[in-house]
Amino acid sequence: MLRDKIERHLLSVQKPSRYIGGESGSIVKDRAMIDVRFAFCFPDTYDIGMSHLGMKILYSLINGRENYWCERVFAPAEDFEKIMRENDIPLYGLESLDPIKDFDFIGFTMQYELSYTNVLNMLDLAGLPVFARDRGNSLSSIVVAGGPCVCNPEPLAEFFDLFILGEGEEVNLELMDLYLECKKSGCSKDDFLRRAAHIEGIYVPKFYSFTYNDDGTIASLDVEEGIPKIVRKRIISDFDKVYYPDNFVVPFTEIVHDRASVEVLRGCIRGCRFCQAGFIYRPFREKSAETICRQTKALCRNTGYDEVSLASLSTSDHSDIGNMLEQLIDYTEGEHINLSLPSLRVDNFSEELLEKVKKVRKSGLTFAAEAGTQRLRNVINKNVTEEEIMNTCRIAFEGGYSAVKLYFMMGLPTETDEDIIGIAELAQRVVDLFYSIENRPKGRGVQVSVSTATFVPKPFTPFEFEPQDTREEIERKQKLLVDSVKTRKIKVSWHDPNVSILEAALAKGDRRICRVIYTAWRKGCKFDSWTEYYKFDKWLEAFEECGISPSFYANRRIGYDEILPWDHLDYYVSKEFFIRENKTAHAAETTPNCRLKCSGCGVTKRTGGKCFD
């Protein structure tokens, strides 16, 4: 029996509770009463996947149907994977401990590009062929994917039967309902996929094929007759009434974000030109303060968590943030619950907001300045001035804080050495500001942490056309920044540029990248987002063996008239808008946020006139 095999080896691995299920809030059903089984797979370890809010939402949503059963599946750590392979233990669902190869759906959430090899590894552990073409035509084991990365699904197209574009609360159940109908009528997998392709938000890659020019660019896209030429993402129109669980599975072991989480809004009004999430999650929608408070109370009561976080791209953009925080703080203080807030914006940070933040956050404050000069902040449409940055830091220092963390990006379009030096100079001015304030915290020195990430051009952004800096140029700029810092009160950190280079190649890749991912996996690549597992040399070997250069995708400027691998997918924001915004960026001009003025991004045409609550 599989359960006996698993239990026999649990004490031989770290954190055995990752692999056995049975947690409070987990849902176990009678197999005899189930019509459709769904394995929700997170292509990383339990500790990371159990922190993912999307899994929590869809897990509860699907299990709300009596005859549907959703189970959780995570990538085993290296020690347990070795045991699984040596003892013929297939990848299984945590609720039933049944092999997922026997499930109807095997669904992956794709949150970051460096998890792609883990998908192949998990399919292989499940005992399934990694290529969709090798899995036969019987209606079973439908391998699907959703999440932000599938806005460009082509690098994964040969491994998946279909992709779910956009928000899943409605379309997932529609897809499962169609499957059940096809299952009862004896349809083949191909018949099911043809019908699924007509559900808004479903992309079936086998019905789409590309041809290429001699220079490697895309020449044309051919679509089978009767299949939609453009696939539009799904959105939830009434976000205040959208399904949200009142209970979470509570792990036995510590996870990355071990707390309750309440989503307060989706989308973003800002339009930062580098930010993929800000565009693919449009239109902007928010929940009422009353809904947020009600959901917070329900989750804390049912899970027993003593910490709750607010999830969004920019919580401080909530139109009723003062009232929302006041209600939440009244509740959480009274119940001795910690309230966690995300990064804050410098252009709407006030003394009033600080007073609320001080009640829930005791450590340093984090602000995203993104660029060291005003010119470059205009290029990326950050719409934040140095005066606002300094005023925000002043409010923080006068309010008792002595530690500030500033986020920046390196390698942004049009960036010069002056912009890199500007990061160090801005950080120095923040240090000087601290010592100029008479009522600053006494007995403590200031600490300004400068965190820099390498710019990665992403699909569905105005910078999708831009090249990424080469590794040599990134490393040169990192050294220039360090050399420009003149005090130990400023600490600088950055990401490995080799990771960012691969991320860019995967993010902007076409269907030919499937071969590279497969080859890299065969060479032992997995857990590529983990420093201790990342094998950049193996990835370079894979690219070379496949006759593909990563620089073709990462370091080449794309022409406005070029066919892009994601041009047949509609995420509500038009390509024409991205071209216009790219030109505006190169003129170092800004575009107002959506509340100030509509920028004509295309959302209103697709939603019928209203783009945010």
Image: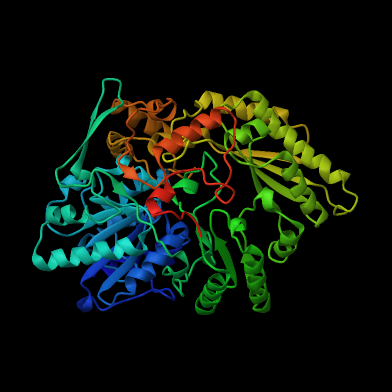
- Is residue 257 in sight in this rendering? yes
The one nearer the camera, 601 or 24, is 601
Pinpoint residue 417: horizontal percent, then vertical percent. Answer: 64, 24
Compared to residue 196, the image places residue 541 above or below, namely: above
Pinpoint residue 432: horizontal percent, then vertical percent. Answer: 83, 40
The one nearer the camera, 322 or 124, is 322
Is residue 351 found left or right of 480 in the rendered image?
Answer: right
Is residue 368 found left or right of 164 in the rendered image?
Answer: right
In this view, which residue lies farthest toward the left? 186
Compared to residue 94, the image places residue 228 above or below, namely: above
- Is residue 4 in sight in this rendering? no
Q: Quadrant of the N terminus?
A: bottom left
Q: Quadrant of residue 368?
A: top right
Q: Residue at position x 53%, y 63% from top?
A: 264
Q: Residue at position x 42%, y 43% from top?
A: 528
Pinpoint residue 295: horizontal percent, then vertical percent. Answer: 52, 73
Pinpoint residue 183: horizontal percent, then vertical percent. Answer: 14, 65
Compared to residue 113, the image places residue 186 above or below, namely: below
Q: Residue at position x 25%, y 51% from top?
A: 162
Compared to residue 283, the image places residue 368 above or below, namely: above
In this view, which residue lies farthest toward the front? 609
Q: Residue at position x 20%, y 78% from top?
A: 32
Q: How many marks?
A: 0
Q: Quadrant of residue 406?
A: top right
Is residue 338 found left or right of 520 in the rendered image?
Answer: right
Is residue 90 found left or right of 420 in the rendered image?
Answer: left
